[in-house]
Structures are given as C-alpha cells and as structure tokens.
Amino acid sequence: MKKNTGKSIPHSCPSLGAEESRAVARVISGRNVAAGRVIVEFEKTVAEHAGVKHAIAVNSGSSALHLSLIALGLGKNKKVILPSYCCSALLNSLSYAGCRPELVDTGKNGFNMDPRCLEKHLSRETGAIILPHMFGLPADVKSAVGWGIPVIEDCAMSLGASINGRKTGGLAEIGIVSFYATKMVCTGYGGIVLTNSAKLANKVRDLINYDNREDYIVRYNYLMSDMQAAMGIVQMKKLSHFIAKRIHIARLYSERLKGLPINLPEIAEGSVFHRYVIRFQSAGLLEKCIVFLKNRGIESKKPVYKPLHRYLSLPQSRFPNTEDTYQTSLSLPIYPLLDDTSVIRIANAVKEYLFN
C-alpha cells in the first residue's frame, strides 16, 4: 500500500495570523479580558454584516441555540422540528431547554431539510423549526417561514452566505452562528444570536447578564470574553476574502474531479463552501476512501459524524435520504490556508482511489 510521501493535510484549519495575535494582546494589556467594550464592537460588526438590528455574543453556538429556544418561550416538552442530518450539538440545546425533537429527512439530492418532508411533521404542538444551512449552502428559508411558525436559522456553517442578496441569519425570527475553530470565522469557541426583534434580543441579554441582579430567575454564564471578540473583529474583516478563497478551492476541486463516478457539489449562488462534500454513487466506498486518503497524509471526514435519528434509536427506514447521504458523503479539506498544490494533490488522490 502506498504511504504518505508529502506533508500531512488536515481536514480543517483556522486561518489565524499576526493581526489576531496583536488584537488579543491589546486586550490583555488593557487588563479587561472578560466581557466589555470589545464585545459591543464585535456585536455591531456582525449585526451590520448580517443586516439585523441586534446581535448578542455568547460563548458557543450551542448556547446561542439554547438561549434562542428560551427567548421564543419554548420548553416543557414543546416540539421543535429539525433535520436528522445535522450536528448532535443541536440535540443538546433542545435537551437543555426541555424541548422535544421532531426529526425530518433531508432532500433526495441535497443536504438541507426537505420542505415537503417538513410539511408532514407540522402540527399544533410544533413550537419552532430549526433550519440549518448545511455546509454553507443556504436552505429554503422562505418555505419554512411561510408556515407562520418561529424559525431559527442555524448559520453555524453559513456566515456570509446569502439568498437573493440577503445574508443568512436575518431571514427569520432569529439566527444563530458558531465561531468554533473550524467555522467561517474563528474565535476559538464562541457564538452569537441574531434577530430584528428587540423583545427577543432583550430576553437573550437578560438571560446572560446573571450577576448583580435584584430579581432571581435561572440565568446562564454564557458570556463571550473580550479576547475572543477581538479575534472575531479581525476575522470579520477577512470574511469576504475567506469566502472568495473557499469558492476558488471549490471550483478547483470540481475542475479536477469532473468526469469521475462521484457526485460533486453545485457551485451555487450565495454558497460560502464551509465544506466541500462529494458523494459516492454507492455505499461501501466511503470508509475505504477515508483510510486510503489517510495513508497519503490527507485527512477527510464524514461531514456529519452520525445523523440524529441514530442517536435517538429511531428506525432508519423513516429517514431514507438521510441514510443514503450519510453513507455516501465525504468532506474534503477546504479552508483559506489551503494552497492550490494541496488541492490538486487531494483531487489526484481521490482519482487514484476511484481507479485503484
């Protein structure tokens, strides 16, 4: 078996540099390293980018979702619809809030939730819909919002993505973003709640400002630090460059992989390519390809570690599209620091695997 003869290529890598280091150093030298004025500036920057009136920075995307559910008045076994094909962190936030997940299948040939499947799950018990923009490709927000039920946009992978010129995160009642190390913008850990509703924004702020209060309700230590916010401000200035580089890499992959017996992602308008996901035409090829690439120094992954219905021990037969997607999809490295030579090396390795 051919082994790695080149430098290892990680699946994900944050694009951080001297500017971020200097920004964090300034905060440290100023001695106010907790939540302060830098967060206010960061919130304003993200709100303006997303085209919303309010942004509340927190310590993670999971916290942002938890707070959003509470702000919408959900809990006590209220049903929340979300796709099975998404990150398990969403289940955690639902559990924190006491909500009951109602899982929906993906579209037959896509990664986002199928609006037709969504309709079948709506009932009087439905309290909200969580709509992830999977891998940076905008989902059908218009169809989801049209049911008159609160929609939470999960923009963990889609900061900067747009639909008809409007940024994701501001297309529904509330949006959440993650700033984890692998996301479009990195603050290490971190998240933000986006909304045009002053009522929802005030509720979220109340829930995280837990100290020195006259009244007592359960509040949460979910604050972001000024050090994280300082990184975020620098990263937001680079976001348009990050997106352009990701799209360039996606185009290069598609050019090099065209004609092979795999399905390639569409270079869709408004997508930011948080992930470049290929699909094999039959199950059974995925795991072997991951090992094959690893032996050549290339890290690749299943884009979703495990669909939610498997965690909840629900029948796989209820989620045929999700199962097919899960068993055939492979995420290749894509991030701004990845150079063209590495992209070509990865594409050539995929070709070698398919024709080996």
Image (cartoon, rainbow, N blue to C red):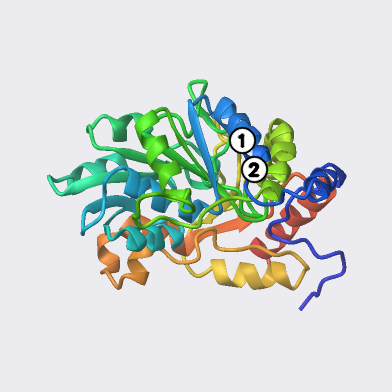
Residue nearest the viewer, comparing 7 with 4? 7
Image depth: mark 1 or mark 2 in front: 2
Judge left or right: residue 4 versus residue 159: right
Residue type pointed to by label 2:
Gly
Left-right relation of 75 to 43 = left
Q: Nearer the viewer, residue 140 or 348?
A: 140
Q: Residue at x 35, y 51 (%)?
A: 215
Q: Name the image quarter holding the C terminus.
A: bottom right
Task: Determine crowd level at label 2: few under 14, some 14-19, many 20+ residues with C-alpha closer than 10 A.
Answer: some
Residue drawn at the location 67% of the way across and 62% of the way down: 355
Q: Residue at x 45, y 60 (%)?
A: 89
Which residue is the site of mark 1? 40
Question: Callout 1: helix, strand or loop?
Answer: helix
Q: Which residue is mark 2?
A: 36
Q: Residue furthest front?
A: 214
Is residue 303 left or right of 250 when viewed as pictured? Answer: left
Q: Amino acid at mark 1?
A: Val
Task: For the N terminus, give its image quadrant.
Answer: bottom right
Q: Residue at x 79, y 74 (%)?
A: 2
